[in-house]
Amino acid sequence: MNDLFQTPPFEPGPALLLLKRSLRDLRPLVEHGNGYELNGKRVIELRGDASFITARLARRPAMSPDWDTMVLKSSADVRKCVDEVKKRLARWTEE
């Protein structure tokens, strides 16, 4: 009975595909290799591992940005990452 409320184990492979799909839908981000660009400047980098996803988000668009790193170990973390990207994208496009 204890298994009833246990969440399924996190699978980084499918979660990374879902994350990429969510980010592709955010305009004007453009997918390029293992990351995303805004107006030709790298703003997001993603890397999958055996048990988690590492996402690096630029603090602001620049040729050599300062990065914030998020380690995604659950579906909730992936949703938080997408929400954070939406916030930053709104801020970046206003500037």
Image (cartoon, rainbow, N blue to C red):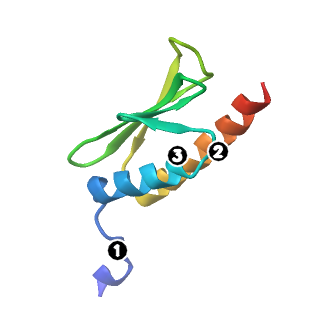
Which kind of residue does numbered mark 1 sit on? Gln
What is the quadrant of the N terminus in the image?
A: bottom left
User: SS class of the residue under badge 1?
Assistant: loop
Which kind of residue does numbered mark 3 sit on? Cys
How far is disc 2 from disc 1 in space, using C-alphas?
Answer: 30 Å
Q: Nearer the viewer, residue 7 or 94?
A: 94
Task: Please tell me which of labels 2 and 1 falls first in the chain.
Answer: 1
The relative height of residue 95 versus residue 20 in the rendered view (above or below) is above
How far is disc 2 from disc 3 in space, using C-alphas?
Answer: 9 Å
Q: Nearer the viewer, residue 6 or 62?
A: 62
How far is disc 3 from disc 1 in space, using C-alphas?
Answer: 23 Å
Residue 61 is drawn in which quadrant?
top right
Q: Which mark is residue 6?
A: 1
Residue 33: image x %, image y %?
35, 34
- Residue annotated with mark 3: 81
Residue 70: image x %, image y %?
45, 37
Q: Looking at the image, is mark 3 or mark 1 nearer the viewer?
A: 3
Task: Please tell me which of labels 2 and 3 falls first in the chain.
Answer: 3
Q: Looking at the image, is mark 2 or mark 1 nearer the viewer?
A: 2
For the point 70% across and 29% down, which residue is it?
92
- Residue annotated with mark 2: 86
Label 3 neighbourhood size at 10 Å, few (<14), some (14-19), many (20+)? Answer: many
> Relative to residue 40, is residue 7 drawn left or right?
left
The relative height of residue 61 versus residue 7 in the rendered view (above or below) is above
For the point 36% across and 71% down, which residue is it?
7
Task: Please tell me which of labels 3 and 1 falls first in the chain.
Answer: 1
User: SS class of the residue under badge 3?
Assistant: helix
The relative height of residue 47 versus residue 83 in the rendered view (above or below) is above
Which kind of residue does numbered mark 2 sit on? Lys
Residue 21: image x %, image y %?
46, 54
Residue ranking furthest to the left: 50
